[in-house]
Amino acid sequence: MPEPPARRRSPRILVVDDNPENRLLMRELLLSRGYEVSCAGSADEAEKFLSNSYPDLVLLDVIMPGKSGYELCRELKENPETRLIPVVMITGLSDREDKVRGIEAGADDFLNKPIFPEELFARVKSLLQLKDFTDELEHAEDVLCTLGLSVEARDPYTEGHCERLAHDASALGHYLGLDEDALVALRRGGFLHDLGKIRVPDEILKKGADLTPDEWKVMKQHPVTGEAICRPLKSLRLVLPIIRHHHEHWNGSGYPDGLRGDSIPLLARILQVVDVYDALRTARPYKPALAHEQSAETMAHEAADGLWDPELVQAFFSMMKERRAA
Ligand SMILES: [Fe+2]
C-alpha cells in the first residue's frame, strides 16, 4: 500500500458532544497529539461551525438534546460539500441498535464510551489517513477538470461549453431518474469528455470543418487519449465510458469502436445528446448558431437518420419543454 500523502498542516477535528466533561477530555487528548480541535455542544452549534469551515474529521455523540447525532451525520453525508469528511459516532458500549442506526446514517466508524485514549488515537489516525487519500483524489480530479477547461479555452468559439454540458447532462440524467453516482459522472463527463484534445494540434482543432483524412485520424483519437489520461483514477470509473464513447453513432457509424444502439453506454449517449444540441446552438467560424426550434428539428432528423438515440433525443426535448414552460 502506498504511503499517504504528507500533510501540510495539522488535521482539524470537530468534537460534537453535549457533555462538557467528554468534550474537555477528548479535546485534551487530541491536543496532546498535535491535532487542532474545535468543540460544539449541540448539532446546531456544529452546523454553525461547519458553515464557516470544514474539519478533517468529526467526532459525534449520538444522543444530544435537539437534533441527534444521527440526524447531523445524515445531513453531513447527504451534502456533497461535506460527505467526504469522516464521521466517528460515539455510542454506549453495548448499543448494537445505535450502531445499526449510525451505519444507516452514513457513519464511518464508532467509538465506545467510556473513551480509551489509545482507541481514540487509533480510530482518528486511520480515518485521517483515508481522508488524505480522498483529498488527493479530489485534487487530482480538479486538476483534470481544469485541464479539460484549458482545452476548451484553446477554441474561443466553445466558451462555456463544458459548464453547460456538465449542467445539462446531469439535468437530463436526473430527468431520467438516474442515481447520484451517475449524475456525478455526467457532471464530470461535461468537463472531461474532450480532454484528449489536449493532444490534437491547434491547426487541426481550430479548423473545425473540412479536415483532411489524415487530420481526421488525429482528431478521432481524442476519446481514446482522454480515456487513457483518466484511467488511473478509480474515482473516474463511471466517467471513462462517457469519454471513450461520446462520438459513437446509434447506427454504428461513429468512433472509436463503431458501437451501435444500446451497446453504446447510456451515460455516453446522454452526454452526446446535450453535446450535439450545444454545438448546434453555438456559432462557429464555419456555421451560424441555430435557434432552439431549428436545433430540435435538426436533431430529430439526425436521430431518424440513425445518428442519435431517438428516445433520448425525445426525452431531452421534453425536459427542455418543461424547463422553458416553468
Ligand atoms: Fe469530443
Image: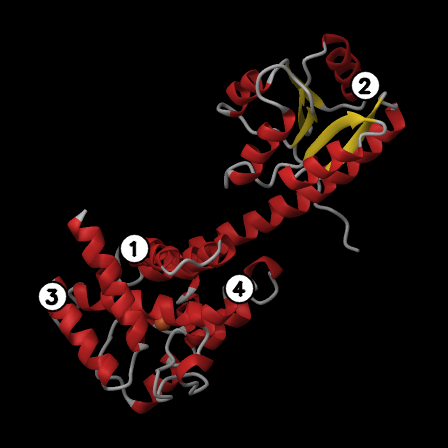
Where is ligand 1, by quadrant? Answer: bottom left
Name the residue at 48% across, 74% down: 225
Residue type indicated by callout 1: Arg
Label 3 element class: helix
Q: Earlier in the sequence, mark 1 or mark 4?
A: 1
Q: Nearer the viewer, mark 3 or mark 2?
A: 3
Q: Quadrant of residue 92?
A: top right
Residues at discs 1 and 2 in contact (Cβ within 8 Å): no
Q: Nearer the viewer, mark 3 or mark 1?
A: 3
Residues at discs 3 and 1 in contact (Cβ within 8 Å): no
The tag on residue 29 is 2
Q: Nearer the viewer, mark 2 or mark 4?
A: 4
Residue type indicated by callout 3: Glu
Observer able to see residue 151: yes
Label 1 element class: helix
User: Residue 55: where, in percent of width, then height?
Assistant: 61, 29
User: Residue 123: where, in percent of width, then height?
Assistant: 80, 35
Q: Earlier in the sequence, mark 3 or mark 4?
A: 4
Tell me the distance, in whole angstroms, between the alpha carbons under discs 3 and 2: 66 Å
Residue type indicated by callout 4: Leu
